[in-house]
Amino acid sequence: MKQMADVGFGMWKVAPEDCERVVMEAIKAGYRHFDCAADYGNEEAVGAGIRAAIEAGLVTREDLWITSKLWNTFHHPDHVEAACRKSLSDLGLDYLDLYLIHFPIALEYVPIETRYPPEWIFDPEADAPEMRRAPVPLHATWAAMEALVDLGLTHQIGVCNYNSGLLHDLMAYAVKKPSVLQIEAHPYLTQEKLIRLAGDYGLKVTAFSPLGALSYLELDMAKQGESVLTEPVVRDIADAHGKTAAQVVLRWGVQRGTAIIPKSSNPGRMRENLAITDFRLTDEEMAAIAALNANRRFNDPGVFCEQAFGLFNPIYD
Ligand code: A2P
């Protein structure tokens, strides 16, 4: 069976107008695993890049691992297949390698024809725009995800942003087991217990935002001083190996057994982020980086939903 490469490429926040170039550059740099989502608002453009790379003879569809994600407004079993088919048609694919539930948050349905991607707010044109929860239990969404595998629309299914309680519950009702748990993880949020539990249940963990704060500076969700790349311990380890601080942090992510999905729009950094297989961190170095843990979560619905969408909606607490 096809394996998901440990270093993938994250498409979050890649502007649609840049996607075709970025996907082509990333494939030329050696990336084969692309992490996409309906909510990133760029799947059509990503699809154009994939098609261009295949037409140029750089790769075949079989060489690629394409992940996409079910958005919150499509959790009801009546909408899961249509949402998956929309991602497939935007990406120009007839199957996904992996389809994930993006958040354990069900929001009121917004038809694809009304607005796509629907994002978080039910009706942005309303006098008082608001995020609206929908009473859809996750087990019902999961059963609809399982049906996608039977239909051949995706080879594997999984979840994102689940905590350990939700994971125990999922494993109790899943007929087809999830193969991947995708969570935020980096040296400031090491998530040891959750990663260990996922491993015990046989799931591979993918770490998003593996470089930590960098991704959140432009969103005002982190401050410059929160970059793990300036930590003296990371810099010292980088110097000792003749690698960059980013390579050390990414290597730490892979060496602890997680897949990582850094994004870069810059071809030099794309190559830099892939070039992490020719060195190994010592146990002491691994521990020193893990000791930076501060349980600092940058992507927290318990914070941003209230700030941006007017609804207090924690999921990890
Ligand atoms: P850029 O695209 O200009 O390279 P994410 O955490 O979502 O993967 O985002 C990674 C962020 O870190 C992006 O802002 C990206 O900017 C930046 N970045 C990616 N790779 C590196 C690197 N090797 N060194 C420094 N910054 C990086």
Image: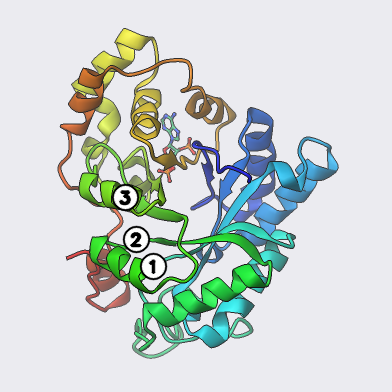
Q: How crowded is mark 2: few (under 14 residues within 10 Å), some or many (20 or more)?
A: many
Q: Where is residue 108 in the image (x, y as percent from the top left)?
A: 43, 86
Residue to which mark 2 is pinned? 161
User: Toward the viewer: 282 or 312?
Assistant: 282
- Structural crowding at the residue carrying mark 1, measured as other residues with C-alpha within 10 Å and reported as few (<14), some (14–19) or many (≥20): some
- Please report the residue visible at 39 percent of the width from the left and 19 percent of the height from the top: 244
**SS state under label 1:** loop
Residue 110 in view in this figure: no
Label 2 vs label 1: CA separation? 6 Å
What is the three-letter code of the residue carrying label 1?
Phe
Which quadrant of the view contains residue 57? top right
Q: Return the residue nearer the eye: 228 or 275.
A: 275
Kindly identify the amino acid type of the residue bearing the numbered disc 3.
Answer: Asp
Ligand 1's image quarter is: top left
Coloration of the structure image: rainbow
Residue annotated with mark 3: 200
**Residue 103 badge:** 1
Image spot of residue 281 (x, y percent): 32, 19
Labelled pair 2, 1 in contact (Cβ < 8 Å)? yes
Looking at the picture, does residue 130 appear above or below residue 92? Answer: below
* CA separation in Å, label 2 and label 3: 17 Å
Does the beta carbon of the residue at mark 3 sit less than 8 Å from ligand 1?
no
Q: Indicate the secondary structure of the residue bearing disc 3.
A: helix
Residue 211: name its quadrant.
top left
291, above or below 170, in the image? above
Query: Can you give x and y, in whole percent of width and height, for residue 254 in the image?
Result: 40, 33
Q: What amino acid is at disc 2?
A: Asn
